[in-house]
Structures are given as C-alpha cells and as structure tokens.
Image (tube, rainbow, N blue to C red):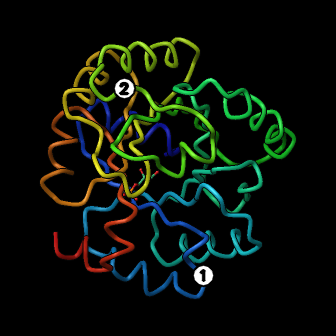
Amino acid sequence: MKVYDSLFTAYQNQQPLLAVLIDPEKTQPEQAVALCAQLKETPVTHLLVGGSTFQGPHLAALVLQLKKASGLPVLLFPGDYAQITEAADGILFLSLLSGRNPEYLIEQQVKAAPLLHHSNLEILPTGYLLIESGAETAVQRVSGTLPLARNNPQHAAMTALAGQLLGKKLIYLEAGSGAQHAVPLEMIATVAQTLAIPLIVGGGIRSMAQIQAAHQAGATMVVIGTAFEENPHFFSAL
Ligand code: 1GP
C-alpha cells in the first residue's frame, strides 16, 4: 500500500501512528543500524528524515541505511529543497501556511519541482503550521516567520482548513524541534475536528503520556525527535 493510503486508513480507523525524526546533520549513515535496533518492537511506525539547516552529501546513504535497517517507511521532511533524495519512500511536500514568507510558501516548492518532476518519490502535499511554543525555534529563525498564537485554536483550525481546501493531504502542527511547550491539546482537538485529512503533531513531546494525549486529542501521527536523540532507549522504555 502506498504511504498516503496507509496514513489515511490509519486516520479513518483512529489507529495511532508514531514517527521518529532523524536529523541528518546529527546522524551518519554508519549509525543507522544501531539507531534502528532501538526501534525494534516499539510502537514506531514511520521515520522522517530532515532538518532546518542540513546541506551535507550523505543524505541518500543515510536514508538507504535507515530503510534497510528499520524496514519502516522513510519520508523526507525537508527544511530546504536541497534535502531531496530518491532513496526515500516519499516526501512531505511542505508549505509553511502559518507564515507569510513567499520563500517557504512557494519559492522552495518551485525550486524542488524539477527534482520531483520525474521522480518516483510519493509526494504528500502537507500544510505546515508553526505554533508558538515559548521561545524562538529553529523553524522560526530559518523561515523568518512568526508562529500562530498558541491561545487561538480557532485561527489554527481555519489556517489548517484553508490548507485542506487548497488540496493539502496532510496538516502538520509544529511547535518546533526541542520546543519548550508542545502544541496545546485543545488546539490539536479543534484542528482535528475541523479537518477531514490526517493530522501530524510534533515538537516538544517528551513522554508517553504526552504522545497518548496528542493521539487522543486527534493527532493521527505524533513525531518525536529530541527525546529520542537524548535517550536512545526512549521507545524501548515505552
Ligand atoms: C520537529 O516535530 C519535530 O519538526 C520533532 O520535535 O525534536 O521536539 O521532538 P522534537
């Protein structure tokens, strides 16, 4: 089954998905086997690969090793169009709908288009919403955009709905990697109730209780980056 079909089936069946974000800036291909060994017999269902600032040459090798060692679908989560490789199963083709910087609304996508034109990558059009989380995050700094207010779930829901109406297949609520505060549960619930497409939630989630709460609020997929980077046993301890 294609990746999006399986995501949509999970959404329809309210089956919780759990993704690990691997930052290629901090991970070498040789580390993939040991890293994936920590994910065996855990609830992890997908791997995302990407970062705000990565420009290095080893992306394809890393993705190939992760695919081989984990057996899980690997999706690109690029901070820049340079982070595209055919080695992955698919790409979250992001548009930063919370921001008002044309570079991340459409320019990066135009630069990516020739790379994706004849590609075999599964393309998953994704509305990406940055949510205020306490302090400035890398996404905010790199994109030069302001996040949406965390105390206005209705505005986040309408921004997400606009994304769905524009044809996005996924919405990603992002507090930012290492965020002080994760996306508020009330906001997850309001957005999820508004949408008819799967919702991804990440940033600042550091415990099983938070993962479960995000799923219960309506996230189809929860993304964990920092908690696993800091503790390789994070998932096996779940
Ligand atoms: C970042 O949502 C992801 O895009 C993961 O965030 O590193 O805080 O888990 P953390």
Sequence-earlier tag: 1 or 2: 1
Residue, disc 2 = 149
Q: Which residue is mark 1?
A: 28
- Any mark on residue 49, and which? none
Observer-nearest of 219 and 16: 219
Amino acid tagged 1? Gln
Name which residue lies at 74% across and 70% down.
Answer: 56
Image quarter of the C terminus? bottom left
Circle 1 residues within 10 Å: few <14, some 14–19, many ≥20: some
Residue at the farthest left position:
209
User: Does dot 1 land on a helix, a strand or a loop?
Assistant: loop
- In the picture shown, does residue 234 fall above or below 149? below
- Could you say where residue 192 lies in the image, as x and y percent from the top left? 29, 24
Residue pictured at 15% horizontal, 43% vertical? 213
Q: Are marks 1 and 2 in contact (CB under 8 Å)?
A: no
Tell me residue 10's x, y (percent).
32, 39
